[in-house]
Amino acid sequence: MSGPDGSNKTTEFLDQITSLWKRNHSFLLGIFYCNDVIYTVRLKNTGNHWEVSDHLMIPFSPEPDEKAYCMEMIAEKTAATLQVMGWPPAPAALCLSEQDIFHEMIRLPDMPADEMAEAVRWELDGRRDFAEAEFLSVFLSSPASDGQWAAAVPKSLADSLTGAWKEAGLELASLTAMPAFLRDSCHISDTDLEIGNHNITPPRDLYDAFYENGGWKALYAAETLCFPDLRRLNFLTSGQAPKSDWNWKALSLTVITAAFIGLFGCFLIDQVQLHIAQEALSEQKAQLNLLASVQKEKSELEASVSDIKRKNEQLVRLSGESIPWRSIFVHLGTMTVDGVWLSDISMPKPNTLEIHGKAIHYDALAEFLQKFETDRDFFPTCPVLKSSDLENSGSHPSTVSFQLELELIPGDDRHAKIG
């Protein structure tokens, strides 16, 4: 495809592909406060354009001693509203009133936008009505050729507001103010909310009273995060249009996908080469029919080896699941103390060892049980003394007959330490 139309379509296609790698937000918030009301506009990204998803008028009347922190408290109020409405956190834009900023119309000759931003800053440095040395500035050229609307705020105010929103768990992505000529251009049509040359799809439940008061400025604040030309009115970027952030997750996924496709292509090439090699090998095998008997013996030998290997694996598995009796008996023999002898060892139920024996007195039996307590490395569980009786046999000294119950763990490596 050639010509202007083909070039434009190619550019649009590349822009669409590039947009997949940019960080696009699903929702944005626009905030403006005046007359004890927080005007909130929530924009939704539909992919091709932005539309007003919701708009709210939140009553907010700070106490007299809280007036100085009113703008910071708006962040807490907004965060609480998001939780009540069930909205996920979204980047927010806050529009300041004319009383919160220094603004003035100035006249400067035409120049590139970056140079204009620097020139406006120099002009405002000599005209601003606040003493703080560090300040942030924005500008917008008037469509009526009346010059440039320029505004400035102390940097400390921007830092304070940014910190307050961060503490509230939200991101203040834009801090702005609305030029008067933009406010005069606001218009509600049948299908759009118009600010200057930008259109936003209105909500279904549109009511004019919201926009007759502070709603336009809340909508305008959100638009400073949507449209590139309005991003220069963001004090937080000092009037410079910020570059779009890359969506590293999408970009990484694209790189991984491309690498996978490349590796899969290499795999296909290897498979083709392998197939060719296998065909060559088949031809060579066809020439070795005279060695069929040897091949048969080889196959039988491989089958025997496989069978032996399978039986060995079964033997190893069965050995691993069994209880190493020799180790247990040897270990019990080493643990038997003076005055204690074992008369019977049985397994009345699976994995349970029953030990019968006698002791010359209870102290010897206690010492024998203590052996199990101090040898937990071999017997992880202690035996349970099921019974102990004192037996008198006439002229012979009395003995203590006892019965112990010990649980074993099949396949436990500790039982194989001896033997």
Image: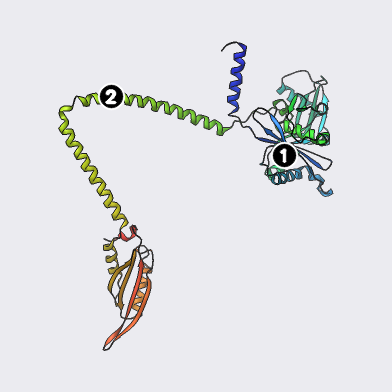
Question: In this figure, which residue is indicated by the disc labeled 2?
Answer: 279
Q: Residue 23, how many percent across, how many down?
A: 61, 32
Quarter that holds the C terminus: bottom left
Which quadrant of the figure has residue 222? top right
Residue 191 in percent (x, y) is at 75, 27
Which is more N-terminal, label 2 or label 1?
1
Relative image position of residue 120 (x, y in whole percent): 77, 25
Q: Is residue 56 left or right of residue 388?
A: right
Res 341 → quadrant: bottom left
Farthest residue, direction top: 3
What residue would you read off at disc 1?
159
Quarter of the image containing the N terminus? top right
Name the residue rendered at 16%, 33% in the picture. Answer: 294
**Which mark's residue is nearer the viewer, 1 or 2?**
2
- How many numbered discs sit on the rendered protein? 2
Vertical side of 143 occupied by 395: above or below: below
- The amino acid at mark 2 is Glu
Q: Which disc, if any, is residue 107?
A: none
